[in-house]
Image (tube, rainbow, N blue to C red):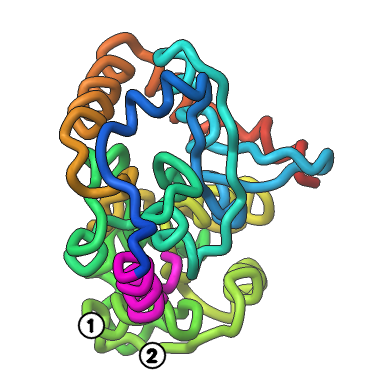
Amino acid sequence: MKKLSLFFAIALVVMAFSAGSVVAGDTLAGIQKRGKLRVGMEPGYMPFELTNQKGEIIGFDVDMAKRMAKGMGVELELVSTAWDGIIPALMTDKFDIIMSGMTLTQQRNMTINFATPYILIGQTILLKKDLEGEVKSYKDLNNAKYTVASKLGTTGEQATKRMIPKAKYISYETEQEGVIELVNGKIDAFVYDLPFNVIAVGQKGKGKIVHLDQPFTKEPLAWGIRKDDPDFLNWLNNFMSQVKYDGVYEKIYHKWFQDETWLKEIQ
């Protein structure tokens, strides 16, 4: 999960309010007048948004944004934005919507509005192949005989310490280091975000590690918009319902979370 820089983000937003530069109102009318949907994202959270070998931004959120723009009958503009400034940029009309794997939190919701969450992720477990069948959930790992790891300073580390307290815990500086140690049999399990774990199994863990892919924490991701814009919020919620009804969402989900073809674009 991306770390919060909420304090600084809110401070910048307050400054924008005081300067009279915050934009609120009818975003849909602005999109139609402009003929373009502007989407803010930080392309560094696979598989939601990332940069391929050609320098293009691709990912789950990108494909959803393309479908959204098509539904509006307008062009799509992707606005690459640093994570710690993404909320202030939205508030000052640098783009119309945040589509960047953002977790819906109560703190963020005090500053911006969120559409209905489009995906629920959380912490999942990469498991040593030898333990397949013996360990079926995080509860089975709560034993001193197991060594469980995660990345230092993440929600994975927090969840492991809170929910698997009896296991021996090790932290790593990077996700990649944790996966390598698991593949090499140095640890029994690695706890981290669902999207990363899906990719790790496809890239490094085939036949060597097992993915217990049911999250044992809940982190809803949602699109962020400015407050005081009920028409845009209504449109987004209805859009989500429609793409789920007509199968578009399922196809995009399969492409990025169940198919490994896209990995060739970044290797």
Residue named by callout 1: 162
Residue, x 59% and y 84% (percent of image)?
173
| Secondary element at image label 1 | helix
Residue named by callout 2: 168
Q: Position of residue 127 (x, y in %)?
A: 46, 63
Q: Nearer the viewer, residue 206 or 172?
A: 172
Farthest residue to the front: give it. Answer: 20
Compared with 60, 79 (above or below) is below
Give the residue type at disc 1.
Arg
The mark tally for this picture is 2
Check disc 1: other Cα within 10 Å, few if <14, some if 14-19, many if 20+.
few
Q: Nearer the viewer, residue 213 or 54?
A: 54
Q: Mark 2 or mark 1: which is in front?
A: 1
Q: Is residue 16 magenta?
A: yes
Residue extent of the magenta highlight: 1-18
Compared with 213, 188 (above or below) is below
